[in-house]
């Protein structure tokens, strides 16, 4: 964090004042802002690229290790679970110890685990290393948006968050396409190998080109018990989802819900909580924007997972061809995300996000009617509408969240943005796992189970569409963002 030379130890423990703000603005130059944005763009590209590329490679990974449908889903779920467990705690740690420090650690962990995945000898090692990758991505996403918000004036946040979101969607766009090519010609291991040079280059830029540190909560204690309770909640609920409809799964989910209640009560009691529940209760924009984000990602993430399997198993496409079809969604997101971000600097971001949620709902209800004879034009049209909806939801909604809190909470707010995304994605995969368990069971997807898989996929899209409709309501009732929010 940048500080005036005469700042005392006592000053470090107080809230940022107007004088501190002037000091920061003199030191954080436009060139530093550009470097911070470029670094965030690289990181924003790398992690979603890996996530979407792996989805297209799932059949190849499953073939290598003879994995059944449930085990195969854990290649994606382990990543999301680790991200959800570590994102919020490390967002808070970043506020205390320094956001750049935690960001660098995250890039390092992600890059190393990507390299080790190239040499993974078994399905268990793949799942464990994907868990490590997810932990690294949590440290990245828990700090990238916070650093960007810290160095960017409020009137320009929508623009830079739009650029960052565009980079995320470029990663999602190129993931299925390049992932399909890499898998087809060089094997699925090559998907993880490409992360290594990007990660090393990003670490170099952070260490040599991004001076200073950001830690507005330096000196405050870390809520270790809250972090443990939060992690237990995530593990028990998600593991329970993966084993439904078994009785033991219900026990796990109920236990996780009880621990969640204990976590909330604990957070309300202590002065320096991991998650400031009071902010959520008192800040309508912050609370409902996060809820809308959770619902949106819950309803949309597993679409690529299902369609990747559908296109390769039922329609008989190669990984390259399936990736080329799936790229239509994130390409639209790339084209419109930056525009939606700039637009949110002039128009209430809540209204834009609500319109995006509505478009997503339309697309999901279209996907309900997919069958084994559905034409590609219909599928691609559905994906284009979904991409447009996500573009107009994500950037404005993130802008609303980050601009609704004070500077000292940027790390936690950034962590909440990522947490809602990842828990939503995890919930989406949880629904997918439940449906696969009920319709397909513990067996490899073969022509004998295609009808069951297709019925399960249609049910999943129906559930996701209903979720999006509910999300429109919560997005609309969030209230209007104050123009001066987030400046203090």
Image (spheres, rainbow, N blue to C red):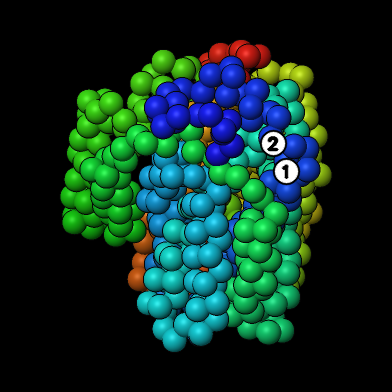
Q: Residue at x 49, y 38 (%)?
A: 215
Q: Is residue 310 visible?
A: no
Residue 21's spot in the image, x, y percent? 61, 24
Q: Is residue 381 left or right of residue 44?
A: right
Point out which mark residue 32 bears: 1
- Foreground: 108 or 215? 215
Cα gap from disc 1 to disc 2, whole angstroms: 6 Å
**Cβ atoms under marks 1 and 2 closer than 8 Å:** yes
The answer to which image quadrant residue 443 occupies is bottom left
The answer to which image quadrant residue 20 occupies is top right
Q: Residue at x 62, y 58 (%)?
A: 207
Q: Residue at x 73, y 75 (%)?
A: 181
Q: How many callouts does the rendering have?
A: 2
Q: Is residue 231 left or right of residue 295?
A: left
For the residue labelled by badge 2, is the local secondary structure a helix, a strand or a loop? loop
Q: Is residue 165 left or right of residue 12?
A: right
Q: 365 above or below 328? A: above
- Foreground: 221 or 83? 221
Which residue is under mark 2? 28
For the residue labelled by badge 1, is the local secondary structure a helix, a strand or a loop? helix
Point out which mark residue 335 bears: none
- Foreground: 96 or 416? 96
Q: 114 above or below 466? A: below
Q: Is residue 332 visible?
A: yes
Q: Residue at x 55, y 57 (%)?
A: 104
Q: 17 above or below 423? A: above
Residue 384's spot in the image, x, y percent? 75, 46
Residue 208's spot in the image, x, y percent? 67, 58
Q: Residues within 10 Å of mark 2 (few under 14, many from 20)?
A: some
Residue 402's spot in the image, x, y percent? 57, 29
For the C terminus, the image quarter is: top right
For the N terminus, the image quarter is: top right
């Amino acid at each position: 964090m940048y500080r005036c030379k005469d700042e005392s130890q006592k000053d470090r423990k107080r809230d940022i004042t107007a004088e501190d703000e002037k000091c920061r603005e003199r030191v954080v130059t436009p060139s530093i802002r550009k470097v911070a944005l470029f670094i965030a763009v690289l990181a924003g590209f790398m992690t979603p690229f890996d996530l979407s590329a792996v989805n297209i490679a799932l059949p190849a990974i499953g073939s290598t290790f003879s994995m059944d449908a449930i085990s195969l889903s854990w290649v994606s779920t382990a990543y999301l679970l680790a991200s959800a467990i570590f994102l919020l705690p490390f967002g808070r740690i970043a506020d205390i110890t320094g956001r750049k420090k935690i960001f660098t650690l995250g890039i390092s962990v992600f890059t190393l685990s990507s390299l080790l995945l190239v040499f993974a000898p078994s399905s268990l090692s793949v799942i464990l290393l994907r868990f490590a990758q997810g932990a690294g991505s949590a440290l990245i996403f828990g700090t990238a948006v916070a650093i960007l918000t810290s160095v960017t004036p409020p009137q320009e946040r929508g623009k830079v968050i739009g650029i960052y979101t565009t980079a995320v969607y470029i990663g999602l766009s190129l993931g299925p396409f390049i992932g399909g090519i890499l898998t087809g010609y060089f094997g699925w291991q090559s998907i993880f190998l490409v992360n290594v040079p990007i990660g090393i280059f990003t670490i170099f830029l952070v260490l040599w080109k991004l001076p200073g540190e950001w830690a507005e909560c330096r000196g405050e204690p870390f809520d270790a018990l809250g972090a443990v309770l939060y992690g237990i909640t995530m593990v028990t609920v998600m593991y329970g989802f993966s084993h439904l409809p078994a009785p033991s799964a219900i026990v796990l989910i109920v236990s996780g819900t009880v621990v969640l209640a204990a976590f909330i009560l604990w957070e309300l009691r202590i002065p320096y909580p991991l998650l400031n529940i009071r902010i959520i209760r008192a800040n309508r924009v912050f609370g409902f924007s996060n809820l809308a984000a959770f619902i949106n990602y819950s309803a949309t993430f597993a679409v690529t997972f299902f369609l990747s399997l559908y296109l390769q198993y039922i329609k008989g496409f190669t990984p390259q061809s399936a990736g080329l079809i799936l790229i239509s969604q994130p390409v639209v997101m790339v084209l419109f995300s930056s525009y939606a971000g700039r637009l949110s600097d002039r128009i209430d971001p809540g209204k834009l996000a609500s319109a995006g949620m509505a478009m997503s709902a339309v697309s999901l209800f279209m996907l309900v009617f997919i069958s084994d004879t559905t034409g590609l034009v219909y599928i691609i049209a559905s994906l284009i509408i979904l991409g447009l909806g996500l573009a107009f939801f994500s950037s404005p909604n993130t802008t609303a969240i980050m601009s609704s809190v004070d500077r000292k909470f940027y790390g936690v707010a950034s962590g909440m943005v990522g947490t809602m995304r990842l828990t939503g994605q995890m919930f989406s995969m949880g629904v997918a796992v439940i449906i696969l368990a009920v319709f397909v069971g513990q067996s490899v997807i073969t022509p004998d189970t295609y009808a069951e898989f297709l019925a399960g996929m249609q049910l999943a899209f129906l559930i996701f569409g209903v979720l999006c409709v509910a999300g429109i309501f919560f997005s609309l009732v969030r209230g209007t963002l104050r123009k001066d929010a987030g400046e203090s």
